[in-house]
């Protein structure tokens, strides 16, 4: 058997079973010290639990591990004395109450022992006997009471009691003898029987773990990442294979990683990153299969380019989760990753998509099925099954009929046109885009992204398609129309927000009627919350619209227009956010080099892009630098220093 010193040293080093052994060894001893002071079994158990929680917190600072018993005894006494002080402030003294109200003594001190066979007379006699017993015990000095409880309840040997209380063996013997003399033999027997029947609950250790976990969750909610991580680690020290604790560590570590990525030129600690992977993976293996845990781990995989692990995790979740919607969402999102360059397994993506539909088609909505097809469009093209994709998506849209939302129809028509473009059927692609613009302008539906949908189709898709068809006149007309629509978009936002002034039921009902069919609309919320939702919707809508029009201009070699629009995107982001995303500056870095041959400006934009550490971690800056436009600076040390700046520490 390990000594106290060995147990404490092991616990300090993170041994998963050491502290549990310490709790098991001393829990009854601590309970025995507290009980005669508070004179209430339930309160004594609560204070014993608080003792061990406090012990967890200060264990690293303990200097004499060989005296861990006395150390715990001191914590127990201190906590008990504080509780008694608080109680005296709010109540009369216990002894005084007993004199004036003998029934209260029975209520507080009676041992909760009961048999259904007792007669009323037997119950009364037992109660009187217990009251007599407790009166005798309470007349003893505190140290004698402690020794009696330790000797009979904990069944500690006299030398163990001496070590636990840090007194001499002779003192223990003398006080025990004195206590025995004070109590008659029959009373000693009653103490043995009565107190032994009041051992701690079997789940005492579980209660301690629950307390530690609750504190960890509170720290997590307050974004106190390091403190949360420490609490959850203590829970794993007590109980092995406890999935919620490993999940908590992983969540805390992910919060620490996010904090590091929020700093310009922030470097993620490699050890911390590996810890995040390890703890969340372990939690998942041990049964933490909730969506929040899965997506936290998936986010780490995706952010740091561990594509295959991302795919495997989401596919496993899709196959095993009982939450149909969450499983289906994870499934088709992992299919999207299968098509990216880091995996590029198109046949696997199509086969997996068919398996996903076979399992879930009867359980998920037509809209969800349509979205899954949109996520896997490229794979169907690559394996030459474009016609199947056309037929299946068209069938789903026909079934949805008037129930299809504006956003859903936009994504469908966008991807349908893109598929025609991939097949080099440019005229059919142009017809799809023109049809959508006619449809959306004829619609009387109100949507904060209505103008965004129009501009995105015009800029990102119709302009490049007309470029392929050498339709110069149409390109000029679309460019002018898109620019005018973008200006009107800002006016529309300002006018709408100006109309939301009165925070009353009439205003809320008016907004409900306007936006009732818009996805994510906060129905039933206050006018202030709706205004916040509208503001955010218009911010993202204008941002996407400007960005996509700029990208379209870049693809048709309208360089100056593209630069001007991307600069407007940067200004728009800066107005509503702390800093601009790396995507915008990466575009600008390539455009000023291509159309202005301005190396210095390109370098400065790349530096700004690298300040978005999430963007840098995803590898996009390096992939952008591989484009032919950067050939002239391919070996330039200044560019290479920015592009190769590490995001993860060595």
Image: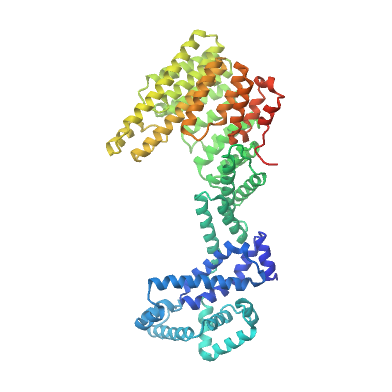
Depth order, front residue of 204/395: 204
Q: Relative to 519, does residue 549 appear above or below in the rendering? A: above
Examine the rendering and report whether any part of residue 377 can be seen. Answer: yes
Residue at 51% x, 41% y: name it.
Answer: 326
Return the x and y of residue 214 as percentages of the image width and height: 51, 57
Rendered image quadrant of residue 103: bottom left
Residue at 37% x, 82% y: name it.
Answer: 102
Q: Relative to 389, does residue 519 appear above or below in the rendering? A: below
Please state, as top left, top right, bottom left or bottom right, where the N terminus lies in the image: bottom right
State the colouring used for the structure image.
rainbow
Depth order, front residue of 153/85: 85
Residue at 34% x, 26% y: name it.
Answer: 495
Please state, as top left, top right, bottom left or bottom right, where the C terminus lies in the image: top right
Q: Relative to 641, does residue 233 appear above or below in the rendering? A: below
Return the x and y of residue 305 as percentages of the image width and height: 64, 36
Rendered image quadrant of residue 169: bottom right
Return the x and y of residue 62 as percentages of the image width and height: 63, 66
Q: Please identify the residue farthest to the right as the structure is shown.
A: 635
Depth order, front residue of 371/99: 99
């Amino acid at each position: 058997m390990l000594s106290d010193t060995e147990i404490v040293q092991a616990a300090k080093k993170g041994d998963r079973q050491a502290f549990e052994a310490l709790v098991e060894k001393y829990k009854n001893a601590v309970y025995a010290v507290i009980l005669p002071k508070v004179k209430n079994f339930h309160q004594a158990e609560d204070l014993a639990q608080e003792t061990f929680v406090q012990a967890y917190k200060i264990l690293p600072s303990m200097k004499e591990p060989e005296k861990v018993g006395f150390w715990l005894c001191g914590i127990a006494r201190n906590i008990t004395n504080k509780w008694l002080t608080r109680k005296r402030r709010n109540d009369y003294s216990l002894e005084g109450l007993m004199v004036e109200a003998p029934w209260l003594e029975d209520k507080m001190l009676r041992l909760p022992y009961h048999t259904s066979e007792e007669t009323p007379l037997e119950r009364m006699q037992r109660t009187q006997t217990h009251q007599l017993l407790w009166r005798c015990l309470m007349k003893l000095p505190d140290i004698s009471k402690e020794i009696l409880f330790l000797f009979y309840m904990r069944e500690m040997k006299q030398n163990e009691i001496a070590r636990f209380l840090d007194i001499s063996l002779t003192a223990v013997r003398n006080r025990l003898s004195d206590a025995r003399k004070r109590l008659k033999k029959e009373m000693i027997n009653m103490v043995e029987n009565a107190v032994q029947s009041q051992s701690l609950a079997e789940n005492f250790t579980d209660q301690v773990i629950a307390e530690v976990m609750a504190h960890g969750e509170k720290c997590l909610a307050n974004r106190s990442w390091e403190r949360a991580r420490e609490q959850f680690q203590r829970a794993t020290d007590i109980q092995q294979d406890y999935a919620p604790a490993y999940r908590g560590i992983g969540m805390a570590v992910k919060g620490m990683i996010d904090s590091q990525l929020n700093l310009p030129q922030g470097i993620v600690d490699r050890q911390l990153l590996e810890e995040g992977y390890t703890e969340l993976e372990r939690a998942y293996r041990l049964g933490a299969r909730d969506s929040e845990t899965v997506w936290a781990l998936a986010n780490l995989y995706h952010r740091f380019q561990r594509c295959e692990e991302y795919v495997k995790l989401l596919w496993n979740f899709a196959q095993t989760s009982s939450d149909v919607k969450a499983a289906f969402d994870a499934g088709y999102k992992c299919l999207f990753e299968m098509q990216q360059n880091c995996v590029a397994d198109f046949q696997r993506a199509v086969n997996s998509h068919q398996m996903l539909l076979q399992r879930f088609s009867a359980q998920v909505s037509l809209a969800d099925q349509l979205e899954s097809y949109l996520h896997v469009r490229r794979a169907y093209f690559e394996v030459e099954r474009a016609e199947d994709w056309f037929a299946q998506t068209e069938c789903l849209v026909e079934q949805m009929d008037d129930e299809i939302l504006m956003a859903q129809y936009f994504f469908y028509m966008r991807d349908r046109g893109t598929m025609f473009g991939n097949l080099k059927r440019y005229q059919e692609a142009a017809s799809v885009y023109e049809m959508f613009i006619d449809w959306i302008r004829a619609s009387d539906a109100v949507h904060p992204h209505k103008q965004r949908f129009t501009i995105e189709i015009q800029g990102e898709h119709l302009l490049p398609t007309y470029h392929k068809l050498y339709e110069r006149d149409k390109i000029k007309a679309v460019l002018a129309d898109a620019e005018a629509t973008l200006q009107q978009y800002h006016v529309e936002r300002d006018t709408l927000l100006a109309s939301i002034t009165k925070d009353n039921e009439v205003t809320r009902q008016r907004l409900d009627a306007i936006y009732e069919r818009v996805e994510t609309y906060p129905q039933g919320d206050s006018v202030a919350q709706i205004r916040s939702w509208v503001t955010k919707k218009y911010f993202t809508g204008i941002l996407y619209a400007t960005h996509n029009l700029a990208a379209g201009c870049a693809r048709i070699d309208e360089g100056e227009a593209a630069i001007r629009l991307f600069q407007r995107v940067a200004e728009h982001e800066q107005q509503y956010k702390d800093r601009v995303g790396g995507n915008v500056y990466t575009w600008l870095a390539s455009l000023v080099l291509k159309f202005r041959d301005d190396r210095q400006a390109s370098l400065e934009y790349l530096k700004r892009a690298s300040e978005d550490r999430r963007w840098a971690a995803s590898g996009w800056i390096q992939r952008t630098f591989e484009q032919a436009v950067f050939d002239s600076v391919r070996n330039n040390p200044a560019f290479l220093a920015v592009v190769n700046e590490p995001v993860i520490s060595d």
